Amino acid sequence: MSPTVRRSGALSGALVTAALLVPAVARSQQSDLSISPFVSFLPSAGASPLAGLALTLAGDAGFSLRGSAHMSLENTNNDYLINGTSLRPWGADADAVFSLGARSLLAGRRTWAPYAFVGVGTANDGSGAGAYRSNWSYGAGLSVPLGAAIDAFGESRWRMSQFVLPTASLAPSPTNEFRFGLSFHVGRSPASPPERRRTRDRRTELTPSSAINTSRYPMVNDGAARVVETAQEYVGTPYRYGGTSPGGGFDAAGFVQYVFARHGVQLPRTSQQQARAGAELSPDWRAVSTGDLVMFEENGKIDHVAIYAGHNRIIHSSASGGGVRFDDLSTPRGEWFMDHMVAARRVTPDAGNLMIDLTRGLTATAPLDPPDHAPKPAP
């Protein structure tokens, strides 16, 4: 096999490996695909910068898979002047990346995010056609968002020339590399956007002339009806960020938590946590019944919750609506909620028709829900 063929195959190996791992990760979590051109610098005498390209599949849980390949910008092998063989130094890596900062990689909601990584690679330092070396490496970096779909990043990598721990006896000293580049987010797994598109499709089915027929979709039980009756008692209570009581005002999740607590259900504090409590329903308006919880997403994150009140209405504490109110899903304002609904949950009664605790141990803290950005109610 010629050196050119061997080099070309090795350069693409890490990217192919990452591409084969994409389906497995995409099945397990919502994910974001990015392409990252970069330049690497080796702080050693006479070393030329290397230009490369990385392919990254990043999940919303902070774990990413990355394949990359790079090649020197200069040819350090002078033999090619004699025998015509060009052997620029090159390398390829496959890394597991772990984000250390809280961030959502979906829909452009990204923040400054430090990360650490570990990986394996192969390289040729340009000294000869057979000078291929396997290695492993580790490092850390920082990603900084520049826009909705672009990040800048910088990282430092320590590369071991042998598969031994840096602290092992007679272990070689690791070489250091610095990498700087841009990440262009070009696609996401089918877990999020198609679901949103299907929600929009359902919205077109539920026009005023074809509003949900509650005789076809009856209430689950009398307990659910009592939940709505309790919620109705607080119509007009003002919205307050972080609010959990009628005296001080409610935010969306605080209102739902308070209402269900009056019926013996101890729900978690935020809409994201409530989206994992109780029984999961299809995120379809035709699947929900009176008393069910419906969750709404904005900028790739669940951040609002309401109670379905039957007759094509929801009741919730809405910042855009000024407080606790009913919203008709057939109105222009209601269409915003129909379009943004991404999850639904059901709490079920026990034999005594009393609600039971369905929090399932969801006690972890989470950021409070921000105000919703639905259109203001019509005058």
Image (tube, helix red, strand yellow):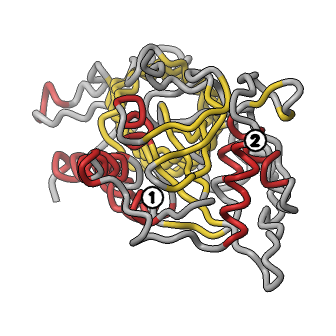
Q: Residue at x 67, y 44 (%)?
A: 271
Of pointers 1 and 2, the one earlier in the residue sequence: 2
Residue 31 image offset from top left, x and y in percent: 45, 48
Amino acid type of the residue that numbered disc 1 sits on in the rendered structure: Pro
Q: Nearer the viewer, residue 125 or 312?
A: 312
- Looking at the picture, does residue 143 appear above or below residue 127? above
Element type where label 1 sits in the image: loop
Asked if labels 2 and 1 touch by Cβ distance under 8 angstroms, the answer is no
Residue in front for this viewpoint, 27 or 160: 27
Relative to 157, 357 lies left or right: right
Place residue 356 in its image quadrant: bottom right
Q: Say whether residue 244 is left or right of residue 375.
A: right
**Can residue 94 be spotted in the picture?**
no
Q: Residue at x 25, y 35 (%)?
A: 87
Label 2: few (<14), some (14–19) or many (≥20) C-alpha neighbours in 10 Å: few
Query: Where is mark 1, residue-wise?
Result: 283
Q: Nearer the viewer, residue 87 or 326?
A: 326
Residue marked by disc 2: 233
Residue 371: x and y in percent read: 62, 24
